[in-house]
Image (cartoon, rainbow, N blue to C red):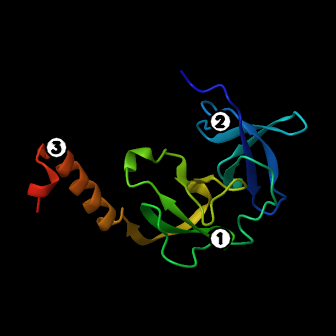
């Protein structure tokens, strides 16, 4: 059963002001467009070719996704595929894609943007809005953290007293 909670979003359009509204999580991605309800209550439909990004937010903030901190300053720490997207209008945006290719919907990509927070949690980027993509790196979990986890699991399962373990 789909979630009944509406999600707040900012729709970034080409050559127009960003539009804030809400979407229904189970029904906003349609065949060739997205649907959202603006804060004044009107239903808006935007074709994938008409907008750059749909940014999910939890609280209002300035619509600065393409103005401030749109690229990672250093290698990101979150696991995933570090990708740089170049839009048809020349804007660029970095993001972390999921390692699982099945998580990528056909109309576009869901990414975690740089400096993700309450005013920019996740971003949907339609494929029709892009001129190019560039894989900047593959970020995996820290091998040190993984080794510590494996060591504690092995210690818990052994049943030996700690004075006999090496």
Mark 3 to mark 2 CA distance (whole Å)? 46 Å
Question: Which residue in the structure is indicated by mark 1?
Answer: 70
- For disc 2, the neighbor class at 10 Å (few under 14, some 14 to 19, many from 20) is some
Of all residues, the one furthest to the top in this rendering is 1
Question: Which residue in the structure is indicated by mark 3?
Answer: 157
Q: Which badge, 3 or 1, is on the more N-terminal residue? A: 1
Label 3: element kind: helix
- For the point 86% across and 34% down, the residue is 42
Q: Which badge, 3 or 2, is on the more N-terminal residue? A: 2
- For the point 75% across and 38% down, the residue is 22
Give how far across and how far down residue 98 sits, in percent: 44, 54
Give how far across and how far down residue 58 sits, in percent: 72, 46
- Out of 52 and 98, give the one closest to the viewer: 98
Give how far across and how far down residue 95 sits, in percent: 54, 63
- For disc 1, the neighbor class at 10 Å (few under 14, some 14 to 19, many from 20) is some
Q: What is the number of the mark on residue 54?
A: none
Q: 45 left or right of 95?
A: right
Question: Which residue in the structure is indicated by mark 2?
Answer: 28
């Amino acid at each position: 059963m789909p979630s009944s909670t509406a999600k707040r979003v900012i729709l970034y359009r080409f050559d127009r002001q960003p539009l804030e509204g809400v979407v229904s999580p189970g029904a906003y991605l349609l065949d060739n467009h997205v649907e959202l309800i603006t804060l004044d209550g009107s239903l808006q439909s935007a074709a994938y070719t008409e907008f750059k990004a749909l940014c999910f937010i939890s609280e209002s903030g300035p619509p600065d996704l393409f103005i401030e901190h749109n690229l990672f300053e250093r290698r990101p720490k979150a696991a995933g595929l570090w990708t740089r997207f170049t839009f048809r209008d020349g804007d660029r945006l970095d993001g972390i894609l999921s390692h699982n290719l099945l998580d990528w919907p056909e109309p576009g990509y869901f990414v975690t943007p740089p400096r993700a927070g309450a005013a920019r949690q996740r971003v949907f980027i339609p494929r029709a809005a892009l001129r190019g993509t560039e894989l900047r790196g593959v970020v995996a979990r820290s091998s040190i953290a993984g080794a510590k986890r494996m060591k504690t699991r092995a210690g818990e399962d052994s049943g030996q007293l700690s004075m006999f373990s090496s």
